[in-house]
Every structure is written in C-alpha cells, then in structure tokens.
Image (cartoon, rainbow, N blue to C red):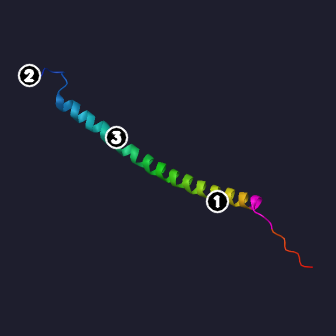
Amino acid sequence: MNAARPGDITREDLLARLQQVADAVNSSSAPARRSGFRLGVIAGVALVILAFFLGRRRGRLTRTFVELRRY
C-alpha cells in the first residue's frame, strides 16, 4: 500500500465523516418520523369521522318514509 502523504484523505477519514453524517440524519429524522406518524393517525381519525357523518346524512336523505294511517 502507498504511504499516505500529508493532506491526503484516507479511508478512515471518509468512514468517520460518513458516520458523523449518518448520526446527524438519524438523530434529526426520529422526531420528524414521530410527528409524521401522529399526523397520520389524526388524519385517519378525521377521515373516519367525516365518512360517518356523510354516510349518516345520506342515509337520512335517501331512506324511505312509510306512513301508516288508521281510519
């Protein structure tokens, strides 16, 4: 193997820098992942509630009304 000259970038330098970048990305993406999950749950619950109320309204508008008359 060739002797490293002063100022050359070695494999260890690259690995150390890549590890620093990977640690920074992992530490900054964890809170974003949690807030994204929370937002997804809230959106899902809102969608279910909206579907319930729209279905309820449609049921009220389209149901048959039977009137019984006694003479």
**Residue 15 to residue 62: above or below:** above
Residue to which mark 1 is pinned: 52
Residue to which mark 3 is pinned: 24
Looking at the rendering, which quadrant does residue 21 occupy? top left
Q: Nearer the viewer, mark 1 or mark 3?
A: 1
User: How far apart in space, not on screen, are marks 3 and 2 (Cα)?
Assistant: 32 Å
Circle nearer the N terminus (1, 3):
3
**Residue 6 horizontal/vertical position (percent):** 15, 21
Horizontal arrangement in the rendering, residue 35 relative to residue 9 (left or right): right
> Looking at the image, which is closer to me, 70 or 3?
70
Residue to which mark 2 is pinned: 3
User: How far apart in space, not on screen, are marks 2 and 1 (Cα)?
Assistant: 72 Å
Looking at the rendering, which quadrant does residue 8 occupy? top left
**Residue 17 horizontal/vertical position (percent):** 26, 33
- Estimate how packed mark 1 is, as few (under 14), some (14 to 19) or many (20 or more) residues with alpha carbons within 10 Å: few
**Residue 6 to residue 66: above or below:** above
